Amino acid sequence: MESQRRKTYTCGTICLKYLLLLFNILFWLAGGVVLGVGVWTLVEKSDYISLLNSSFYSASAYILIAAGLIVIVTGIIGCCATLKELKSLLIVYLILLLCIFLLEIIAGVLAYINYQECFPFCYQLDEELRQNLKLTMQQKYQQPEEQSITQAVDKLQQEFKCCGSNNFSDWRESVWIQAADNQRLVPDSCCKTPAELCGRRDHPSNIYNIEGGCIMKLEDFILSQLYILGAVGIGIAFLQLVGMMFTFCLYHKLKEDPY
C-alpha cells in the first residue's frame, strides 16, 4: 500500500514537472514574440512615430521590449527550478510570477482610470498631436539638417498611402513648397507612382487623397499597437495564473514526496 502511494506521488511529481516545463516553453515563446514586436516597432516604425513629438507612443515599444526580457528571464529561472527540483528557487519563481501578474493588473487599472479622467480632454490632446504633425511637415520637410524628418515624412506617406497631415492641401503652407524655385504642389512621395517632379500635379488621380490624411492612418497604427499591448498583457496574465498553479502544486509534491 505504501509503495503504491509513493508511486502515485512520484508519477504526479513527474507529470507536474513536464507540465511546468511545457508552460515555460510557452512562456518563453510569448516573451520572444513580445520582444520581437517591440524591436520591430523601434526599427521599422520609430521614424514616423517620432514625428508626433510625443514620448508616450514610442514608450509602448520600450514597454514591450522590457516585458519580453522579463518574461524570458523568469522562464529561465522556472526551467532551472523545475529541472533541478529546487524548492527555494521554485518559491522565487512563484514570487516573480505573482509580482509580474500584480504589476500587469495595477498597470491596467491605472490605464483605465487615466483614460476615464482624460475623457473630456482626449479630443483636445488628439487635436494637439494633429497640429504638431502638421507644423512639423510644413516647417521641417526638405529643410537643411532635417533629413531625418524628410525621410520619415516620405516613408509615412508612401507606406500609409496618404498625403499631408489632414489632407494634401496642408502642403500649400509648406516652407519648401512656397520656395521660389520649387515646381511642386506636393512632395513626390504623395504620388501613387513616385517619380521625379510627379508632385507638380495634385489631382486625386495622381496623388493619395484620403479622408483624414496621414494623421488618421498614424493614429490607427498607434491604436493597433496599444491593442497589441493589451492582448499581450491578457495572454501573459492567463499564462501566469496557470504557471503559478503548477508551481504551487509541484512545490507541495516535492515537500511530500522524497523522489
Image: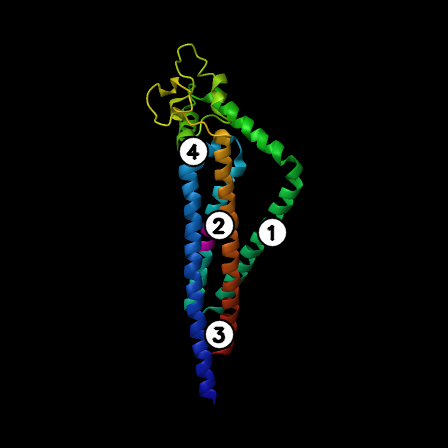
Label 4 crowd (10 A; few <14 / some 14-19 / many >=20) = some
Residue at 48 percent across and 34 percent down: it is: 217
**Eye-nearest disc, 1 or 3:** 1
Kind of residue indicated by mark 2: Ala
Does residue 76 appear in the picture of this structure? Answer: no
Q: Going by the picture, which residue comes out furthest to the top? A: 180
Crowding at dot 1, Cα within 10 Å, few <14 / some 14-19 / many 20+, comes out as few
How far is disc 3 from disc 4 in space, using C-alphas?
56 Å
Q: Residue at x 43, y 61 (%)?
A: 24
Query: What amino acid type should be assigned to the residue bearing mark 3?
Result: Leu
Identified by mark 4, the residue type is: Phe
- Is disc 1 in contact with disc 3, using a CB cutoff of under 8 Å? no
Q: Residue furthest left?
A: 195
Circle 4 is placed at which residue position?
A: 160
Q: Which residue is mark 3?
A: 254
Q: Is residue 55 left or right of residue 182?
A: right
Say which label, 1 or 3, has the lower sequence index.
Answer: 1
Instruction: Report the side of 241 relative to 21 (left or right).
Output: right
Q: Position of residue 222 (x, y in %)?
A: 50, 39
Q: Dominant secondary structure of the magenta stretch? A: helix
At horizontal 38% and vertical 22% (from top left) the residue drawn is 188
Residue 124's x, y, as percent?
A: 62, 31
Q: In the rendered structure, which segment of residues is drawn in magenta?
A: 67-72
Q: Is residue 211 above or below residue 113?
A: above
Query: What is the secondary structure assignment of the residue under circle 4?
Result: helix
The answer to whether residue 160 is magenta is: no
Q: Which residue is mark 2?
A: 67
Residue 220 x/y as whole percent: 50, 38
Judging depth in this view, the residue of 9 and 133 nearest the camera is 133
